[in-house]
Image: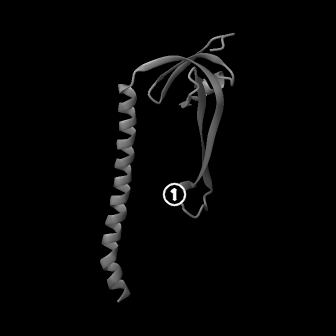
Amino acid sequence: MFFGLFDQLFPLMFTAVFLFIVGTFIYTAVIGFSTWHKNNQSPRLTVPARVVTKRQNTTHHSHPAAGDASGAHGFHSTTSTSYYVTFEVESGDRIEFAVRGQDYGMLVEGDTGRLSFQGTRFLGFERIIGNDF
């Protein structure tokens, strides 16, 4: 009796999980494309700004090696770091951008200069020495 019920429910459960995974993938792709399109339609702006804060987010993942879920062949670890910088513009508004590690390393809290961006996309920061906006 139990196996008969399982045989009836398995195709339904399999289909539901499959549709959930495909739906999540499609949703993520649409959101990503929407953000990309919105950024491309936004004007490129260059404004006086000051670097207020910097932060980074580091994540670690461990995966069983050789496809063995038990970990008998050891684990493979990966680390990913995302970098963020918050700028303050003349009006006092603050804007945070995801930046490349190279840009993150070149910026120092308190730097003043000209911030270039397009929508939520960081384009660059040109430091100006001895200038308070």
At a point 36% along the width and 59% down the height, the residue shown is 20
Where is residue 133? Give x, y as percent. Answer: 62, 15
Q: Pick out the residue farthest to the bottom.
A: 1
Q: Relative to 111, is 54 above or below?
A: below
Side (left or right) of 51 relative to 31: right
Quarter that holds the N terminus: bottom left
Q: Nearer the viewer, residue 128 or 68?
A: 128
Where is residue 32? Give x, y as percent. Answer: 39, 39
Q: Relative to 70, is 121 above or below?
A: above
Q: Nearer the viewer, residue 18 or 83?
A: 83
Q: Nearer the viewer, residue 33 or 63?
A: 33
Per the image, the residue denoted by label 1 is 67
- Identified by mark 1, the residue type is Gly
Quadrant position of residue 85:
top right
- Badge 1 crowding class, 10 Å Cα cut-off, few under 14, some 14 to 19, many 20 or more, is few
Quadrant position of residue 72:
bottom right
Where is residue 97? Give x, y as percent. Answer: 54, 31
User: In this figure, which colouring scheme has been used for the structure?
Assistant: one colour
At a point 37% along the width and 63% down the height, the residue shown is 17
Where is residue 10? Give x, y as percent. Answer: 34, 73
At a point 31% along the width and 71% down the height, the residue shown is 12
Identify the element where label 1 is drawn.
Answer: helix
At a point 64% along the width and 17% down the height, the residue shown is 112
Quadrant position of residue 78:
top right
Q: Which of 73 and 18 is in front in this view?
A: 18
